Amino acid sequence: MRLTTGFTSYLYCFETANVRIICPIAEREFEGHVDIVTPYGFSGFVGNGPCLQFPFYWSEFVKERGYVCGYIALNPIFEKDAYFNLNKAYRSNTLYFLDLTLSINKLFSNLHKNRRRKLKDFDKTVFISDRNALTNFLVGNYPAFLRRVQAPRAAYFTRETLISLCSLDNVVVVGAGTVEKIEAVYIFAHTRYAADCLFNVATPEGRHYATLLLWWGVNYLKSKHIALLNLGGGVRENDSIARSKEFFGPIKLPFRALKQVYQPKIYEELCRRRGADPADKTGYFPGYRSPAVSD
């Protein structure tokens, strides 16, 4: 995401004899100080085992780097409570996951009848796999699509970011449309452990392809023996996007994030300069970056 934000980004890695813990972070400068955040679409603190001493080592790391504070999103399927203080974790949304270890028939039966009806033409649909053409469609239609769905500003990726993502070996791009033109594209990213729905972009006339393209992805990812598919969540809790994802019969898990302050005095001063309440961590964090506060 550095191609969009310009932030210095890297993968933090902690290792002991038997445990490895990683976390992608991006550094952001603000009035001569630096805070950290997990890059958009990434979640922090994933490890292969428990380490009760990790919070101490993390505290030493951020102190050594001089960070003011950190916003660390947590993936609910990978998070381990031993890595962080639960009192600093705040729930902001719900994420929806499909269990791809279930049979395709069971996944189909879990669908809402509306979604099953949309799949009646699945075998007749011509899916498009031309990566170059689909990438061009994504790049050309992405800004207008975001404006139409009123997406948050963090979702506005640059052309370079979109092209880079679509070129990755672990990213799958599929589309649909008519003989004359592409009308919709769906993009999935995956590892051998789990997959994510990254983007679904469509023209107004191509919106009806969303369920068909997602179901194509379910079949493809099952063929790769990937266990979970993250459908994401809504822009806000229980909005129309979230409700549409419930139609797939998913597992629902809380999406939480750590809101950690490493240098309280500096954090409080930066918040005061912007008219933000430094004690309030229930809303936008860090408070001094909130678009709602005065300049």
Image (cartoon, rainbow, N blue to C red):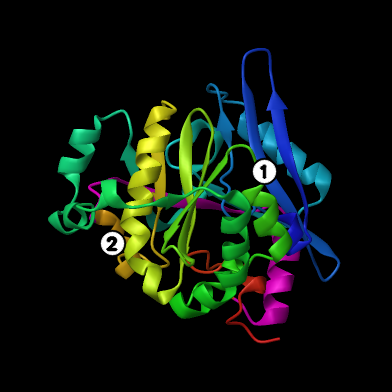
Looking at the image, tell me whether mark 2 or mark 1 is earlier in sequence order.
1
Place residue 60 in its image quadrant.
top right
Q: Position of residue 182 (x, y in %)?
A: 48, 64
Q: Is residue 234 visible?
A: yes
Residue 205 higher or lower than 159, as above or below: below
Residue 124 on the magenta segment: no
Q: Position of residue 129 (x, y in %)?
A: 51, 47
Residue 244's label in the rendered image is: 2
Q: Nearer the viewer, residue 256 or 95?
A: 95
Q: Nearer the viewer, residue 291 or 88?
A: 291
Residue 264 on the magenta segment: yes
Looking at the rendered structure, the kind of residue marked 2 is Ser
Residue 24's label in the rendered image is: 1
> Going 41% across and 50% down the picture, which residue do you hit?
127
Residue 85 higher or lower than 178, as above or below: above
Please give the range of residues in magenta.
Answer: 247-276
Residue 186 higher or lower than 49, as above or below: below
Q: Is residue 106 left or right of residue 71?
A: left
Residue 75's label in the rendered image is: none
Q: Quarter of the image for the C terminus: give it.
A: bottom right
Please identify, in this view, whether the residue under mark 2 or under mark 1 is nearer the observer: 2
> Going 33% across and 46% down the picture, which residue do you hit?
215
Looking at the rendered structure, the kind of residue marked 1 is Pro
Most extreme residue toward the top, as rendered? 17
Most extreme residue toward the right, as rendered? 32
> Going 76% across and 64% down the picture, which residue do you hit?
266
Q: Quarter of the image for the N terminus: give it.
A: bottom right
The residue tagged with tag 1: helix, strand or loop?
A: strand
